[in-house]
Image (cartoon, coloured by chain):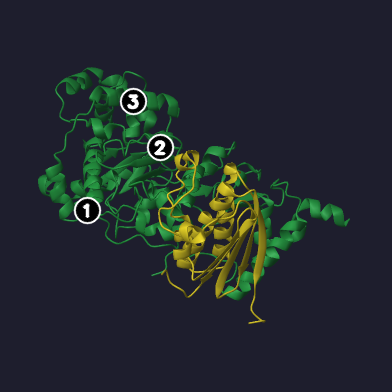
Amino acid sequence: MKEKPYHSIHITKDKCIGCVHCLTACPTKAIRVKDGKAQIINDLCIDCGECLRACPYDAVHSHTTSFAALDAFEYKVAIPSTVLYGQFGGSTLPTEILSALRRIGFDEVYDLSSICELNNAATEEYLNEHPRPRPFITSTCPVVIRLIQQRYPALCGQILPIEPPREIAAKILRTILPKSLNIAPEKIGIIHLTPCSAKMVSINSPATMNKSYIDGAISIRDIYPQILNAIGKNQEDALMRHLFPETQFSGIGMGWSLSGGETRGLKNHRAVAVSGVRDTMRVLDHVEAGLLQDIDLLECTVCPDGCVGGPLEVENRFLAKSRILQLVAAAGERAVVDPKDVSRLYHKNFLSFDHPLTPVESHPLDADPARAIEKAQRREKVFTKLPRKDCGACGAPDCRTLADDIVRGLARLDDCPFVNKEKR
Amino acid sequence: MAADAVFRQEFPLKGGNFAKAGAVALLIKDLLKDMGLDTKTIRRAAIASYEAEMNVIMYAWEGRVSLAVTPREVQITFDDKGPGIADIELAMTEGYSTATPEMRELGFGAGMGLPNIKRSADVFHIDSQSGRGTRLEIIIRTNGHET
């Protein structure tokens, strides 16, 4: 049963020069530089992509699905993150982007804004039916899920147990497409297009589903050139599709990728939105200390400003955000989903987790509590010998982490260049 | 008992230092995690120490937190120099608070602080001298349960 956890983030050794940028950027202190190369401690990594943003040498790589891998499927379906609508300048219509995806080889393309609205309605209903605990935390960000499993085990039960829009969309398509197309389910590839470095984690090792309904995730960065090329070629078709739409974009769901977008549509509940990994951790610390109990729903996304700040996007997030806000304003409060229909799916548990979120194994200083306590005391003593410069020269991100590594037997006091100097 | 491993550490607190509010409770929580205590004990300690730390920051001039951990229990003592609590029994009443409007604006002062601490702890002992200060001692047993 015990599987090695899957990670999407990897270091390309040839490119790594062993500097300290990623060391200090990592919010969970999961990186060490050993023998001149950065190494990721898998048990601590949450695949947030902060190292990927920080690396000046392009040595951090996030595993995503390649476009060529789609050839394995007879029928290819794209479900792009709504972040994609903000990537192509101020006047490109979402329909243009969706038609461009058809043009480059997808057989069918589905907009996610309507499913975001669906999720919103289901969330509202869940909160109505469950007065406790408070606050619930949204399940959308796969990094938040991993972070809670790893560092906030007490909060596992506070994740609102409704799957995020991408999975609900894929589940719906997985249910209806094989019948309507008369194609075997395994020959239909459902692909998410994403700015996120962690979607492959939620696909390959889902935390609350037996199996993900999505077959792969292509990074927006990878597929961007092809879309850009195709957009130029079919503007007229796209305009016509826009004027006579087959897809009704949801005003409530359109802004889902911006921080606060998931909770904007809630009518009767008090919500708070947090973005950025360090701010998210600060707020989760407060929740674990029993605060924020007057808040119904806490939206946490670890990327700055929400998914629109994902590390694998192309457009800078401020321009992307501005474009998406334009689209939100244009769509207004347009609802495309009837809450009564959502309620039927919700009560069939179609939207629920397959199983509750459970903590991952923790890593105390020692498996034996008495020894762990001794080591904690020793760690304080070791720490007083260190210079507190947090320079990273030892290979650990800061002096406190080096002290921790030393009592765990993973490093030595003389790894610190300053301690060495004094001895000589 | 004497052979028991014990971890001891002290943390200073400064009254009115809202910028660092909750920092000691967070350190305590992380220490307990590293010492491998169970999730429930850690959460109870986190809730109790956060509330107690906030009391010192909000009302006292300065204080000291002493943490002692053994495999069987977590003992946390909050000593402060401050105005003290004139009527402890009244202060223990749920909903009773002397918080200023500014404190309430920050989300404190619901009058649940001391009752919450007591609920999270297995042993709760409070001593206060008006005009001198307050000493709050709590023990959370690792095999205990919320009462």
Locate the C terminus of chain A by quadrant: bottom right
The residue pinned by badge 1 equals: A129
Residue B74 in the figure: left or right of residue A201: right
Residue A386 position in % (x across, y down): 75, 54
| SS of the residue under disc 3 | helix
The residue pinned by badge 3 equals: A325
- Residue at 28% x, 23% y: name it: A329
Residue B136 position in % (x across, y down): 57, 62
The residue pinned by badge 2 equals: A306
Chain B representation colour:
yellow
Quick check: A99 above or below B129? above
Disc 2 marks a residue whose amino acid type is Gly
Q: Tell which subunit mark 2 falls on.
A: A
Few, some or many residues within 10 Å of mark 3 (<14, 14–19, 20+)? some
Between the residue at mark 1 and the residue at mark 2, the CA separation in whole angstroms equals 27 Å
Q: Is the residue at mark 3 from the same chain as the one at mark 1?
A: yes
Q: Do the residues labelled 3 and 1 touch (CB within 8 Å)?
A: no
Nearest the viewer among A41 and A148 is A148
Disc 3 marks a residue whose amino acid type is Leu
Q: Earlier in the sequence, mark 3 or mark 1?
A: 1
Disc 1 marks a residue whose amino acid type is Glu
Residue A238 in the figure: left or right of residue B8: left
| SS of the residue under disc 1 | helix
Locate the N terminus of chain A by quadrant: bottom left
Few, some or many residues within 10 Å of mark 1 (<14, 14–19, 20+)? few
Chain A representation colour:
green
| SS of the residue under disc 2 | loop
Q: Where residue A279 is drawn, which disc sits there?
A: none
Q: Tell which subunit mark 3 falls on.
A: A
Q: Tell which subunit mark 1 falls on.
A: A
